[in-house]
């Protein structure tokens, strides 16, 4: 049987990298829950990068919250590249003043046809209008691209409800809403962006991962220690190994 707990690592906080920014309201709530319970229920998921840093691919707000609470170590479930799939989220947002502000923003250029260069985003509006957003300035570097992504997402993310759907699940949004679709990003691009010191806006990348470790209830007091007591950690791992259950995907069978 595959020992998933062998991939649970305690990593020094300084070796943790994040590829996306956080949402203040969500971060405050996440931190409050962890602080009140005194435990981390679900460890973030990470991959080991070539430079020896651990890149969080799921659990940015939990990681930010742990760091804000003074945790010296972050427990992560390390996943191999072949064990996940990187995709993007489509954002469904009400049509409102944010759309006009983006239209009037001089950093963007609106096109009705897709050009050879990669757009900042594709925007579909409920009345069957489709636009491609391009930078007005002739730059294609990561820093500029990430700035425009964040500028676009920030225009609606904090003032309107955002419904996320896997890319391609919805062809056209309902009347009165807009669909924002971001160009796909590869893992190599993501690692390069992070290594250059840039981050994506929150809620844009989507990782499909099987075999998540859940409800471990890791004590925050342990994570705040400068030097982890190895015996205490090994006792916890032993307890988890004895109580771990594997839940397979649901199957519906008719016995008639």
Image (tube, helix red, strand yellow):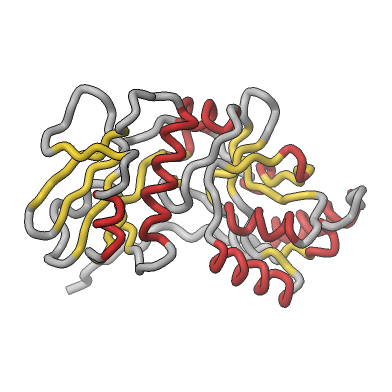
On the rendered structure, is 169 left or right of 142? left
Q: Nearer the viewer, residue 242 or 191?
A: 191
Q: Is residue 208 visible?
A: no
- Where is residue 249 shown, x and y percent of the image? 39, 58
| In the depicted structure, whether residue 206 falls above or below residue 219 | above
Quarter of the picture holding the C terminus: bottom left
Give left or right: position of 191 versus 36. left
Query: x%, y% of residue 241?
Result: 70, 56
Residue 217 seen in the figure: yes
Q: Quadrant of residue 217?
A: bottom right
Q: Residue furthest left?
A: 128
Residue displayed at 46% across by 39% down: 147
Tell me the residue at 85%/57% (across/down). Answer: 224
The residue drawn where x is 51% and y is 50% is 211
Vertical side of 37 occupied by 3: above or below: above
- Image coords of residue 159 (percent x, y): 39, 67
State the count of labels.
Answer: 0
Relative to the observer, which residue lies in front, 162 or 105?
105
Compared to residue 233, the image places residue 96 above or below, namely below
């Amino acid at each position: 049987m595959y020992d998933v707990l062998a991939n649970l690592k305690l990593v020094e906080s300084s070796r943790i990298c994040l590829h996306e920014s956080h949402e203040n309201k969500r971060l405050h709530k996440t931190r409050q829950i962890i602080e009140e319970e005194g435990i981390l229920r679900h460890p973030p998921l990470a991959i080991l990068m070539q430079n020896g840093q651990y890149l969080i691919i799921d659990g940015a707000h939990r990681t930010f919250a742990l760091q804000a609470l003074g945790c010296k170590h972050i427990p992560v479930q390390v996943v191999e590249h072949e064990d996940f799939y990187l995709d993007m989220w489509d954002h469904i947002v009400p049509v409102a003043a944010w759309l006009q502000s983006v239209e009037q923003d001089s950093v963007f250029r609106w096109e009705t046809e897709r050009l050879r260069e990669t757009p900042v985003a594709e925007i579909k509006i409920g009345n069957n209008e489709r636009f491609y957003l391009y930078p007005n300035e002739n730059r294609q570097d990561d820093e500029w691209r990430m700035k425009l992504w964040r500028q676009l997402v920030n225009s609606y993310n904090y003032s309107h409800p955002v419904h996320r759907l896997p890319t391609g699940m919805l062809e056209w949004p309902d009347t009165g809403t807009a669909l924002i679709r971001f160009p796909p990003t590869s893992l190599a691009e993501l690692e390069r962006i992070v290594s250059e010191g840039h981050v994506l806006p929150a809620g844009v990348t989507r990782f499909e991962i099987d075999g998540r470790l859940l409800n471990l209830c890791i004590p925050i007091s342990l994570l705040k220690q400068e030097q982890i007591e190895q015996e205490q950690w090994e006792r916890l791992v032993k307890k988890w190994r004895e109580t771990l259950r594997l839940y397979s995907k649901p199957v519906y069978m008719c016995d008639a």
